[in-house]
Image (cartoon, rainbow, N blue to C red):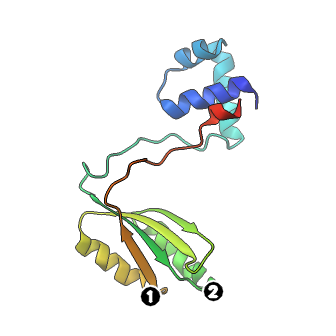
Amino acid sequence: MDSIDIKILSLLQKNARMPLKQIAESVFLSSPATAARIERLESDGIIGGYHAEVNLKKLGFPIIAFINLELEPNQKPEFYPFICSHPNVLECNCVTGHFSMHIKVAFDSTENLDLFIGNLQKFGKTETQIAFSTPQEPRGVTVEKLL
C-alpha cells in the first residue's frame, strides 16, 4: 500500500459513493488505474464493503444499549448463532475482563430491550448500560494519519 492507496481509502471513507472520475482526479491517476487500485484494495480485504449510514432514531430505534454478558467458553457454539441472527444486535465483541461479551443493541422501546435481555440471560449474567447521547458516532481509523 502506498500514499495513493491511502488517499483513495481516505476519500472512500468520507464518501463511499464518490464517483470514480472524481477519485481519479484527486489522486492524479486515470479512471482505469484508480479502478484497478480499488479492486486490489477490495480483493486484498482492505476494503471490506460499502455501507449506508442509517439514523437509527429516525427509523424508530431510539434506545441504544450496551450489554455485558458473562459467557462460558462452552456456550459459544450456541451463543454465536443466537447473537448473529438477532436483528437488533449492532455489534458483539468477545472481550477481556469479568464479562466476556460486549454487545451493542438498538431497540424501539425499553420493554423490548428488557425482553431481549431476558432471552440473553439464559447464557449468563448481564449488566446493561443505556446510552443517553453519542457525542462521537462510530468511525473508522483515519487512514490519512498513515502518511
Q: Amino acid at mark 1?
A: Lys
Which of these two is toward me, 132 or 106?
A: 132
Q: Secondary structure at mark 1?
A: loop
- Side of 116 where 22 appears, left or right: right
- Does residue 66 show up? yes
Give percent across and percent down for residue 143: 63, 35
Q: Amino acid at mark 2?
A: Asn
Q: Which residue is mark 1?
A: 122
Instruction: Name the quarter where the C terminus is drawn.
Output: top right
Which of these two is toward me, 122 or 40?
A: 122
Q: CA distance from mark 2 to mark 1?
A: 14 Å
What residue is rendered at 39% in x and 74% in y?
128
What residue is rendered at 40% in x and 42% in y?
53
Q: Which residue is mark 2?
A: 74
Please give the label number shown on residue 67. none
Above or below, 39 against 140 in this view is above
Q: Earlier in the sequence, mark 2 or mark 1?
A: 2
What residue is rendered at 48% in x and 75% in y?
68
What residue is rendered at 57% in x and 19% in y?
23
Q: Secondary structure at mark 2?
A: helix
- Side of 79 where 57 appears, left or right: left
Q: Quadrant of residue 119?
A: bottom left
Q: Quadrant of residue 113?
A: bottom left
Mark 2 Cα shell of 10 Å, populated few (<14), some (14-19), many (≥20): few
Instruction: Name the quarter where the N terminus is drawn.
Output: top right
Above or below, 66 against 48 in this view is below
